[in-house]
C-alpha cells in the first residue's frame, strides 16, 4: 500500500533561517514521483517541487530543495531563508506508476509558522 | 493563462440534499481529479477522469459521482449529503494520464462545503 508520513504537525522557524520539513513514504512500485505542495489559509494547493525516483540529484527550485534519500524512503523539504509569507500548511505527496496511475497520495501535512 | 477554476467557492447545504461542484482545468489539460480535504487532514482522492472516462476511484461511497465533459471540464455530484461530507473539495488538472510518475497536478482554489 502507498503511504506518506509527515510526523511534524507543527514547526516554527525564525525569519531568514532555514527549516526542514520531514516526509517518509512507503511504496513497492519502482517508479514514483514525490511532490511538495504549500497550502495557505486560502485553501489552494500550490506546487513547490518534484523529485523522481530515478533522479540522481536532489531537486531544487529557488529557495526550496528536496533532500531525497531513496534507501531511507525519505523526501524532506528544505526551505532556505524563510520569509513571513512561507507560513502555511505543507503537504508531501506521492504518485506511483504503474499501479495507481494519476492518483496522488498525501500526507497529513505540517503547519509552518515563520516568526519575525 | 488561467489556472484551474472551481465553482462555487462556498456552499451551505442541509443533510439529505444534493450538491454539484464544478471545475474547469487549465487550458490543454485533459485529466481532472477530485479530492476531499477534511479539516486537519491531507486531501483524499475521490475520482480521476481522462478523456471523459473514469480512470480511478478512491474509497468513497456511491453517493459520490462525477463526469467529464467534451471541453474537459468536470462536475462532482454528491447525493444524500451527510454532516461528514463537510470539507474542502479540490479539483486538480494535469496534461494527460501520463505513464510517468513525474506529471504534476495543479490544483484549483477549492469549494468549501458545509453540511448542516
Image (cartoon, rainbow, N blue to C red):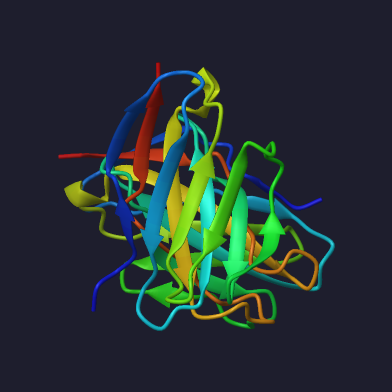
Residue B55 as seen in the image, left or right of residue A57: right
Query: In the image, what residue occupies the spot 15% across and 40% down?
Result: A116
Asked whether B39 or A56 is in front, the reply is B39
Q: Where residue B98 appears, x then y in whole percent? A: 63, 81
Q: Most extreme residue toward the right, as rendered?
A: A28
Left-right relation of A23 to A112: right
Residue A19 appearing in the image: no
Residue B95 visible from this viewpoint: yes
In the rendered picture of this protein, how many numbered marks are placed on residues? 0
Q: Is residue B18 above or below residue B54?
A: above
Q: Residue at x 31, y 33 (%)?
A: B11
Determine whether B52 is above or below B81 in the image.
below
Q: Which residue is depicted at the point 26% across and 59% down?
A: A81
Task: Name the residue nearer the viewer: A74 or B72.
Answer: B72
- The location of residue A84, given as percent across then percent down, is 18, 47
Q: Quadrant of the C terminus of chain B?
A: top left
Where does the image place residue A33, in percent across and percent down from the top left?
63, 70
Vertical placement of B6 versus A102: above or below? Answer: above
User: Which of the 4 image quadrants contains residue A27?
Assistant: bottom right
Q: Residue at x 81, y 67 (%)?
A: A29
What is the x, y in percent for residue B94?
49, 73
Residue lying furthest left: A116
Q: Nearer the viewer, residue B7 or B1?
A: B7
Quarter in which the N terminus of chain B is drawn: bottom left
Amino acid at each position: 500500500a502507498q503511504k506518506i508520513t509527515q510526523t511534524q504537525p507543527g514547526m516554527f522557524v525564525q525569519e531568514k533561517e532555514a527549516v526542514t520539513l520531514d516526509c517518509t513514504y512507503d511504496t513497492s512500485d519502482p517508479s514514483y514521483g514525490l511532490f511538495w505542495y504549500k497550502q495557505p489559509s486560502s485553501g489552494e494547493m500550490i506546487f513547490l517541487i518534484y523529485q523522481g525516483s530515478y533522479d540522481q540529484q536532489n531537486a531544487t527550485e529557488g529557495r526550496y530543495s528536496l533532500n531525497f534519500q531513496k534507501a531511507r524512503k525519505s523526501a524532506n523539504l528544505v526551505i532556505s531563508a524563510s520569509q513571513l509569507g512561507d507560513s502555511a500548511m505543507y503537504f508531501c505527496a506521492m504518485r506511483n506508476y504503474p499501479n495507481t496511475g494519476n492518483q496522488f497520495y498525501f500526507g497529513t501535512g505540517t503547519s509552518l509558522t515563520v516568526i519575525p | 493563462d488561467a489556472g484551474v477554476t472551481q465553482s462555487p467557492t462556498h456552499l451551505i447545504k442541509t443533510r439529505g440534499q444534493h450538491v454539484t461542484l464544478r471545475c474547469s482545468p487549465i487550458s490543454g489539460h485533459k485529466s481532472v481529479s477530485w479530492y476531499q480535504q477534511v479539516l486537519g487532514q491531507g486531501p483524499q482522492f475521490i475520482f480521476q477522469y481522462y478523456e471523459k472516462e473514469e480512470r480511478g476511484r478512491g474509497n468513497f461511497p456511491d453517493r459520490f459521482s462525477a463526469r467529464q465533459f467534451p471541453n474537459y471540464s468536470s462536475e462532482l455530484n454528491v447525493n444524500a449529503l451527510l454532516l461528514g461530507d463537510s470539507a474542502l473539495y479540490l479539483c486538480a488538472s494535469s496534461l494527460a494520464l501520463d505513464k510517468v510518475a513525474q506529471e504534476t497536478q495543479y490544483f484549483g482554489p477549492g469549494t468549501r462545503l458545509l453540511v448542516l
